[in-house]
Amino acid sequence: MAIRSQFGEKLNELHQELLTMGMMVEEAVYKAVKSLLDKDVVLAKSVIDGDKAINDAEIGIEKTCFSLIALQQPVGSDLRRIATTLKVATDLERMADHAVSFAKTTISLKDETYAKPLIDIPKMGELVQKIVRDSLSAYIKMDHEAAAEIAKQDDVIDEYFNKVFSDLIELMGNDKNLIHQGSHLLLAAQYLERIGDYATNICEWIVYMSVGKMVELN
């Protein structure tokens, strides 16, 4: 019983480590989007500099997971929880990489005046932050029904991306001098779209952790 109790405590600690990593990723996305909106190069660089801490968090989670598997030899639902944690940590790390790429867009456009106010990309960023935050909440609660609902929001993110794509293609088509700016903004939107995809992946892993089978949610 004592061994089982200790294992449960370790799992709870592991979940807290993942939650902390997730909050770091959410903050990185927020800062990246705000840096573009405000043309804040210092903020953009803080996203880039902060990526190492997120990478270190992923490595720490991996070590804990492998240690639990080696020492406790979990099976069934316990093994699924650990496997899910590994996968979610990987997806979070990839999200952070996209946030870094987004921040680099801010730096690339620092000397340019935007052809028109940024509206849809910030809205897209807010929704991406929300889906990341909500997916982590569903993970902690092991709520696969909530995860399935959260994943549906990725369709709205895709709609935002399609609108941004169409607007920027039209903008660049009308003024070739805006190709540099437009292409970088298009990449920024694509980074957000990919973060939304990874959040959907997390939701799928939550379903796997809860019911023991993989379900494609989007």
Image (tube, rainbow, N blue to C red):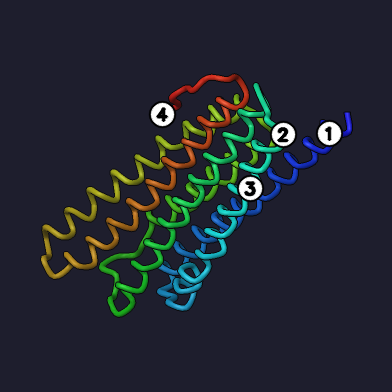
Residue 42 location, x and y as percent?
47, 78
Secondary structure at badge 4 equals: loop
181 over 120 or under it: above or below: below
The residue type indicated by label 4 comes to Asn
Q: Which residue is mark 2?
A: 72
Q: Amino acid at mark 1?
A: Ile
Mark 3 or mark 2: whose residue is earlier in sequence: 3
Question: For the residues marked 4 and 2, what is the alpha-carbon distance in whole angstroms?
Answer: 34 Å
Q: Does label 4 or label 2 sit earlier along the sequence?
A: 2
Cβ–Cβ under 8 Å for marks 3 and 1: no
Is disc 1 surrounded by few (<14), some (14 to 19) or many (20+) residues within 10 Å?
Answer: few
Q: Which residue is mark 3?
A: 18
* Residue at 11%, 57% in the rendered image: 173
Residue bearing the label numbered 1:
3
**Contact (Cβ within 8 Å) of mark 1 with mark 2:** yes
* Residue 111 in view of the camera: yes
